[in-house]
Amino acid sequence: MAQPRVYSFKSSGEFPSNVNERTSQQVRLDPPIGIRTPLQLGDGSDGLLKMHRDLPATIGDNLKNLLLTNKGERLMDYNFGANLKELCFELGTEEADAEAINRIRTAVGRYLPFVSLETFEPINETDINGELAKVGINITYKIPVVSQDARRVEVILYTVG
């Protein structure tokens, strides 16, 4: 009498249709362009860290990082940054605003020359007691190579809580 055969499910493999379906779900049509900041753990399609997948969002993130960085804070590139923190408490005055605009224009011209700066607006918010609560800037910009739509970035330089 012949012994019945015993098959292991581990060695049985997969149907080709199942393999194709699984791999097509994993392949994304839009490849990652840059790491999203602040750093966050990614999901299955991003890998270890969350990624940007469209160019305008990547450029906006890079512009924000450029504005938040002071000279000397970036390793291997001492001149990277707009150096705005030292102007933080003077923003809103004509002299400080002119200096901030000049520093931003210089930094963007050097590191993001494809960005066209449109408007600059200082933020000086106070709390209900009239004390300083938040200092920052709003910048409107365009990326002519990508689109003619104006985009906006808000950078908070100092908060009191």
Image (cartoon, grey):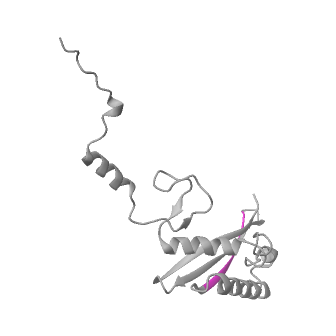
Q: Is residue 29 magenta?
A: no
On screen, 122 above or below 26?
Answer: below
Residue closest to the eye, 34 or 133: 34
Question: Which image quarter is the N terminus in?
Answer: top left
The x and y percentages for residue 43 are 49, 51
The x and y percentages for residue 50 are 54, 58
Where, by quadrant of the figure, is residue 69 drawn?
A: bottom right
Is residue 136 something that shows in the picture?
Answer: no
Residue at the limit of the structure toward the left, as seen here? 1
On screen, 43 above or below 113?
Answer: above
Question: Which image quarter is the C terminus in?
Answer: bottom right
Q: Main secondary structure of the magenta part?
A: strand
Give me the residue at 22% from left, 17% from top: 4
Is 32 on the left or on the right of 107, as rendered? left
Give me the residue at 42% from left, 66% from top: 30
Magenta residues, as a range? 119-127
Residue closest to the eye, 72 or 133: 72
